[in-house]
Image (cartoon, rainbow, N blue to C red):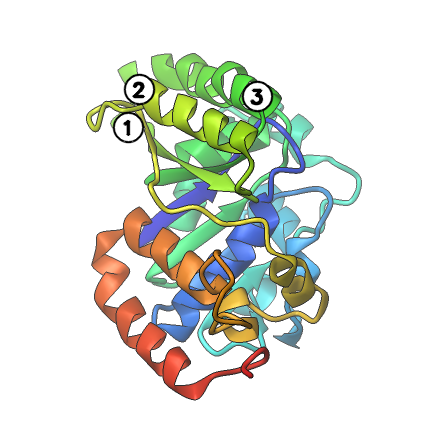
Amino acid sequence: MRVISIISSKGGVGKTTTTANLGGLLAEAGFRTLLIDLDTQPTLSSYYPLAHDAPGGIYELIALNITEPEQIISSTTIEGLDLITSNDSLGQLPQLLHGAPDGRFRLHHLLGQLPDYDVILIDTQGARSIVLEAAVVASDHALSPITSELLSAREFIRGTVGLLDDLEPLTRYTALDLPRISLMLNRLDYTRDAQNVANTLRDLYDDPDGRVTILDSALRNLTAFRQASAVGQPIHRFEPRKPYRDRVAPAGADQIIDVASELNPAWAPSLTGLQATLQAQGGRHEH
């Protein structure tokens, strides 16, 4: 089981969209996938239609230690894609975890009691909290979307990297290692300013052995991503091919496949097979 948290100390960078599209893609490629919505604004919980809506969600998992799948795990209409919904509408989990002796480690322990998924993707809130820290501690890897703006880059360095620096002392007393972070440029356009920010970040994190690496793959600023979310579809289904040949940006499906393949090269063979199928079938925008 591979646990990946999608994190940022800044809101509005596209964490939920990234989580949903990665989850939909991996499930269709044959990986049994679980999405966990840790955001108090439960956008991920309503991103895809549900085939089964469990009576409980993240509150029951973390606050009550309930791990029975029928109680907390919903299933989406995408085969192989399950979901633990966000239902902490009163925001009680931070206070609960602050008062618990296992606060930052509880989610890590609980995930080990869930069914055996190939991958778990955790969507987090865009603000520093003990819930975000628990997600990081529970993860094997972290993916941090960032928009190509100077303020976003500064916040990533100050907030997200600073978060891991602050958690580093925990590793001295436990057998846990903090995850490495893959930085993914999101909503990247072709303006000079955006390219300059992207190049600055690549220069800053050019050490392959460092804590942070920046993905060569990026998600472009496409209207298709917003349109796909509006109709509850993953981008690889909504835009499997470019809508017109002379568009510079690759198809949405190709972009998310490239990101997933770089994030975990072990997924690449299955994703390449799915990509070939999508290109052969066409789809929503095919002309």
Q: Nearer the viewer, mark 1 or mark 3?
A: 3
Q: CA distance from mark 1 to mark 2?
A: 6 Å
Q: In terms of secondary structure, where does tag 3 sit?
A: helix
Q: Which residue is mark 1?
A: 177
Residue 274 higher or lower than 10, as above or below: below
Pick the front one: 43 or 220:
220
Q: Which residue is mark 3?
A: 150
Q: Are marks 3 and 2 in contact (CB under 8 Å)?
A: no
Marker disc for residue 225: none
The residue drawn where x is 23% and y is 23% is: 207
Q: Left or right? Give the position of 265 relative to 42.
A: left
Q: In terms of secondary structure, where does tag 1 sit?
A: loop
Q: Residue 281: which quarter of the image?
A: bottom left
Q: CA distance from mark 3 to mark 2?
A: 31 Å
Quadrant showing the C terminus: bottom right
Q: Are marks 1 and 2 in contact (CB under 8 Å)?
A: yes
Mark before the other along the chain sequence, 1 or 2: 2
Q: Does the image show residue 66?
A: no
Which kind of residue does numbered mark 2 sit on? Thr
Which kind of residue does numbered mark 3 sit on? Leu
Q: What is the x, y in percent for residue 125?
A: 63, 36
